[in-house]
Image: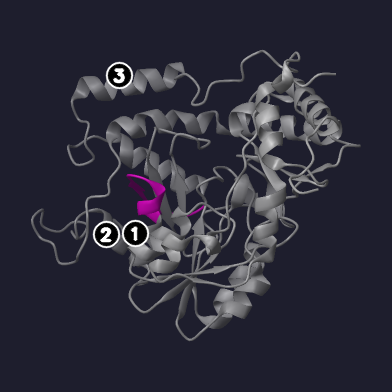
Amino acid sequence: MTLAIHGGVPVRTAPWPAWPPPLDDAQRALVTEVLDSGLWGATQGGTVVARLTEAFASEAGVPYGVAVGNATLGLFAALRGLGIGRGDEVIVPAYTFVASATAVLLAGATPVVVDVDPADLHLSPAAVRAALTSATAAVLPVHLAGSPAAMDDIADLASRHGLAVVEDAAQAHGARYRDRPVGGLGDAGVFSFQSSKAMTAGEGGLVVCRDEAVHGRVWSVCNVGRRQGGQWYGHPDVGWNLRLTEIQAAILLPWLDRLDAEIDRRNAFCAAARRELAGLPVSVVPAPPGTTRDSRHLLMLRLETDVDRDFLLRAMAAEGVPLDAGYPPLGGMDALLKEGARAEACPAAEEAARSVVWVRQQLLMAGPSAAPHLAEALAKVLEHREPPEGS
C-alpha cells in the first residue's frame, strides 16, 4: 500500500472538527448582550467576568478567583501573590510549555528545571527532592495534557520544606485527582483560555485559590496595585492591568455547561484509540496514579520502534491524521539559561522529546468512530517508514 506522501490514497479525507468550535446559542446570546451593553471592559460595571470567576473557582473547589489576560500572566500573578520574587527558586518540570518557566522569570525568580517521570511525563517528586536548595520557595507542577500531576507527593514535599505550590492547570479544565478538582489542590492554580485550550476565548486565563489573603494580593497584582474596596487612584502596592474583558468572559461562562460532555467525547476517542493501537509498536502515555478524571487535552503516544520522527509526522499529515512533535526539553533552551534558569539532568524529558508524539484536541473531538483512522494511518506509515538517518 503506497503512502499518501508518495502519491497513495490517504487514510482519511474528511475534515476534523474545527477548534475552537462554533459559538453555541448560549454563548452567542451572552456575547450579544455584552456587546449591546457597551460594558466591555472589566471595570465598567459589567457582571460577566465576576460570574465567570465565581463559577470557575467553585468548579475548582475553592472560594476565590481572579480572571486575567492569559495564563502566563496568571502564573506570574500567582507567584507574586504568594510572595515569590528575587532570590527565590521555583522548580518546574522539563517537559512543559516554555511559559511555565518564563512566568517564573517574569516574577523575578529563578526557574529550576527538573526531570519528569519516565512513564507519565509529569513532574517527578524524586527530581524535585533532589533539586531542593535553601533558596527553593515554590514548586510548579503542570497537569500535562489534561491529566493531574502526582499532587499528594508534591504536597507532602512542599509541606515538609515550607514551599508554595502553584498548579499550572492550563491544559486541565475539569480534570480531577483522587476525586478532587485540579487547580484547588495547591496554594494557587492557573487555567488558560488560549486558542488551543479546552475552553477558549482566543486568549485569557484564571487564577484560583483558597486563601483570602493570597486572593487579595493576586487581585492587587492584576489591578494596578489597588486594594479591594480601596480608592480608585490609591495604589498601595505595585501591580499591573492584567484583566480579562467582559466579551471574553461571555464566551467562556456558558462553556462550563458543556465542558463535561466534551471531556467525555475526548475520553471516548482515547479509549477507542487504545484498543485500536493494540499490536502496534505504539503505546498511550499513561495518566499518573491518582487520576480520576483525565480531561484529555492531548493524547500522548510513545513510539516504541526506531523511526525517523520527522518523516512520520509528515507522512501522518499526508494520510489526513496530523500529529504534533510535542515539547523540546526546557533545560536545553539557551534563552532560559541566559536569563539565569538552572537545569538539572533530565533524561526522561529528553527521551520524550525523541519518542513521544501528540494527537491534538480537535482530533479527539471527532469521537470514537474516528479512532480507527489514527491506528490505520500509524500502521501504514510504520510499515513503510523510512529508516532513521544513519541506520
| Residue 66 part of the magenta segment | yes
| Mark 2 residue type | Val
Instruction: Indicate which disc, 2 or 1, sits on the residue closer to the N terminus.
Output: 1
Asked whether the residues under the numbered discs 2 and 1 touch, taking CB atoms below 8 Å apart as contact, a structural biologist would say yes
Please indicate whether residue 163 sits to the left or right of residue 266 in the image. Answer: left
Res 77 label: 1
Q: Which span is picked out in magenta?
A: 61-74
Q: From where the camera sits, is residue 189 visible?
A: no
Q: Earlier in the sequence, mark 1 or mark 3?
A: 3
Are dots 2 and 3 in contact, CB under 8 Å?
A: no
Q: Position of residue 186 (x, y in %)?
A: 52, 63
Q: Residue at x 18, y 25 (%)?
A: 38
Residue topped by disc 3: 32
Q: Which marked residue is nearer to the observer: mark 1 or mark 3? A: 1
Amino acid identity at mark 3: Thr
Q: Secondary structure at mark 2?
A: helix
Give the Cα distance between marks 2 and 3: 30 Å
Q: Position of residue 257 (x, y in %)?
A: 52, 30
